[in-house]
Amino acid sequence: MKKNENNTDEKKENLITSPEIEVKDLLNEKIDSKKEIKDSLLINVDDPKNIPVDYYSSANCLSSLFYYWAFKIIKLSHKVKITIPHLGSLTGKYSSLNFMNHFYHIYFDLNYQTKGLVWSIFRSNVCTILIVLFLGLSSTGINVVQMMIFKAYVALFKEDQINNTDIYTFIYYGVGFLITKLINIFISKKINEYQNFVGFKAGVELNCLIFDKLLVVSPSSRHNKAETGEIVNYVQIDSNQLIRFVTMSPSLITIPISIFAYSFLLFDYLGISFSFGLSVLIIFLIINYFMQKSFKKLQKKRQGNMDKRLRMTTAILFNLKVLKLYSWDDFFYDKLNDLRETELNTIRKIFNFRNTNQTVFWLSPIMTTIVTIGAYEYLNKETQIENIFVSLGVLNSLQEPVRAIAMIYTSFLETLISLKRIQKFMNQENIKEENIITNDERTKGEDVMIKIENGTFSWGAEQKGILNADDEDRVIALNLRDINFTVKKGEFVCIIGEVGSGKSSLLNAILNNI
């Protein structure tokens, strides 16, 4: 007790003599105590046993359905500062290492590279796409059942039936409608989840394939068919086109089936009256077909204009010193501006065309509804209220797939054009390792480091024209012929020659780049 009293007396004296220091010490003690509590809550990420597994891939069916796995992460974030190790490592099909090994097995081992990128990516993601397709068809089926329940429920309120129906029948139909609605909502959430997963997975697969090809492609082939700017385009633009399309690809099948199912219901409820609305819908589909053909031509033209501009830009950047030396900068500046203006004009046409297409398809379900209901009222003397209510609900459900047709098929055409461009890059020749002889017995005792005998080298038999307006390939002469020289260990060799005589080409030949 005496020691405690002495300690308190000392603290009081210190507080009187140096109050600022004492207050700082007290604050530091509080901060240290809070830090100890916080450190005790932190997970020791150095110990693998303490690192949690991936919450998403380890979630059970109910946790995945109601997103309880995300709630665990949110709950953990209230205790500690979330870092990457806290989220765990992706495992199974969600690990990029695993699904890329699977994709390479399909592309190289199963020889899908001969079938093209479209089939390779589809084969790699066929299971997930089929799951999305099944869920989409299930959603359509449940929606049809929901409409039938709603029609029967509305029919119970007729004057001749409402007095003869007990309360439990109303409850059964009401609960059935609610359950089907909830199931449809959960299915829609899972469809969105799987679509995003398969879309980004396909994009990663394509980008990895492009980067791997870039490491082994022959520079002579790459120089002729794909400049640096074009390769960046493949990764940034064409890859995003693929992500958007793969995300929506199951809709290519589910949308026609949905339109057929909803049309069948409308024929059942409205009879011949819906044929007038269906005629309007078919007219809009025919208009869309011709608009898509024109859009495909514009999209090809835009890709071609963009490639010309990128090749010109790359050529200017690589030869900037020469352009400045000979005062050619104004000429190439005007040339680049002309290419850019041509590209912008094409982009404006595509933008206006796309807006017109979207407007037409947003208008099509509205016009179909007006014509259908108008024809039903005109042809039928007695109007059944349940048919009107349910038909409006079906027509409302019909709007989404009809409006999505334009967007999905536009994305489909854009993706096909983009993948064709990437396929040309993937078909380029690789560096031929067999052209280099290492540890040759003939030069083993001569300390020879580099030796070329009767070498003939070229940057390729064809080269795309940079300044040509028609962008036609032109045949070029071989760069180097009958090269013979030897470089021994320790020698200092200079390569001297005029501009364009082949000095850089010779060095690239030594590096096996041409």
Image (tube, rainbow, N blue to C red):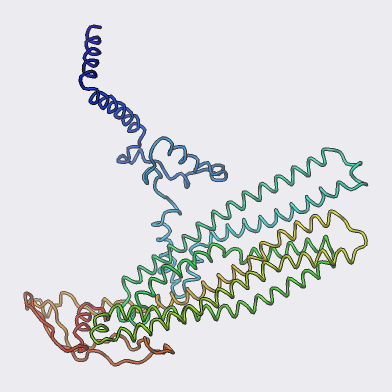
Residue found 57% across the figure and 60% down from its top: 130
From the top left corner, tell me how far across and down residue 200 is, in percent.
Answer: 47, 60
From the top left corner, tell me how far across and down residue 398 is, in percent.
Answer: 71, 62
Q: Is residue 387 left or right of residue 189?
A: right
- Most extreme residue toward the top is 2
Residue found 65% across the figure and 77% down from its top: 289
Residue 380 figure quarter: bottom right
| Nearer to the camera, 135 or 40 | 40
Q: Is residue 298 left or right of residue 181?
A: left
Residue found 61% across the figure and 67% down from its top: 252
| Nearer to the camera, 12 or 507 | 12
Residue 249 figure quarter: bottom right
Residue 39 position (above or below residue 366): above
From the top left corner, tell me how far across and down residue 6 is, in percent.
Answer: 21, 10
Residue 447 figure quarter: bottom left
From the top left corner, tell me how far across and down residue 307 is, in percent.
Answer: 42, 79
